[in-house]
Amino acid sequence: MKFFIDTANLGQIKEAQALGVLDGVTTNPSLMAKEGIKGDAAIKAHYQQICEIVDGDVSAEVFGTEYDDMIRQGEELAALHPQITIKLPCTKDGIRAVKYFSEKGVKTNCTLVFTVGQALLAAKAGATYVSPFVGRLDDISSDGVALVKEIVDVFNYYGYQTQVLAASIRHTQHIIDCMKAGADVATCPLKAILGLLNHPLTDKGVEIFVADAKKMEG
Ligand code: E4P
């Protein structure tokens, strides 16, 4: 399973990249706004900086809701760097735009997916990634991980190449559950990724080995 980091924060992206396990980055308008980025030039410069830090795909989301705006913004973003993946919402216009970009060989991430039917449309339009929102479904007492599993099963059954990118991951257990459900990618906050390291017996073991290693000092 690939790990993407779900942030526009350059410090966190650098920290995750330094860990050596990072496969890409996802952003959205909320995450970009949180970093205080304002204006077209600053947005584009920020994406370029992210692409210079990481080796993998970097999802940049269009802001427009109409097809023509999505195409214009997507073209501009795609021209920034070969690692840019155009993130488009799973709406009627968004699906049309996914089809447009996939026919041009531009990578796409179809976002805001909450049903297996939406995922099917994204796959048929040729999306590179489809992003079911795990946490937001859990927030409304629905089962986000179950949706990930359902999409994985349908894609495997029909042989769709679209990768299932589990998004809206809120904590470490979500990562484990999405891995067991067969997600191709999980995009996660840094804290949730680092949480995978946590085990008291690992900490205790290191403590004991450090103490015993000192006994061998000459
Ligand atoms: C990433 O692609 C999504 O935009 C993000 O995971 C949404 O997360 P949230 O539901 O925590 O805002």
Image: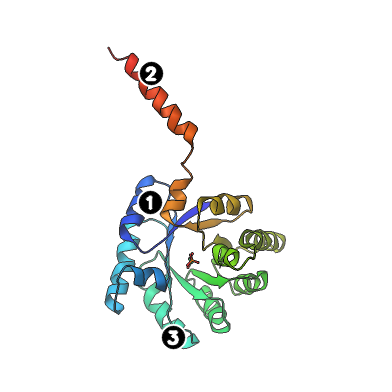
Q: Earlier in the sequence, mark 2 or mark 3?
A: 3
User: Where is the C terminus found, in terms of image quarters?
Assistant: top left
Give the CA distance from mark 1 to mark 3: 33 Å
Q: Residue at x 50, y 58 (%)?
A: 170
Which residue is the extreme one toward the top? 218
In the picture provided, is 142 more to the left or to the right than 48?
right
Which residue is disc 2 drawn over? Answer: 212
Q: What residue type is labelled 3?
A: Asp
Around disc 1, counting alpha carbons within 10 Å, would you say few (fewer than 14), some (14 to 19), or many (20 or more)?
many
| 102 in relation to 169, above or below | below
Amino acid type, callout 2: Asp
Type of amino acid under label 1: Ala
Identify the mark at residue 16; answer none if there is no mark: 1
Q: Which of marks 2 and 1 is in front?
A: 2
Residue in the image at 52% along x and 80% along y: 97
**Is 161 on the left-hand or right-hand side of 12?**
right
Mark earlier in primary sequence (1, 3) = 1
The count of marks equals 3
Whether the residue under disc 3 has CB within 8 Å of ligand 1:
no
Q: Where is residue 87 in the image (x, y as percent from the top left)?
A: 47, 72
Quadrant of the rendered structure where residue 8 is? bottom left
Judge from the rendering whether residue 36 lies leftward or rightward of residue 138; answer left or right. Answer: left
Is mark 2 in CB contact (under 8 Å) with mark 3?
no
The secondary element bearing badge 2 is classed as: helix
Residue 179 is situated, as x and y percent measured from the top left of the image, at: 58, 51
Which circle marks residue 69 in the picture?
Answer: 3
| Apparent side of residue 84 relative to residue 165 in the rendered image (left or right) | left
* Residue at the extreme right of the image, as rendered: 157
Sequence-wise, which precedes: disc 2 or disc 1?
Answer: 1
61 or 217: nearer the viewer:
217
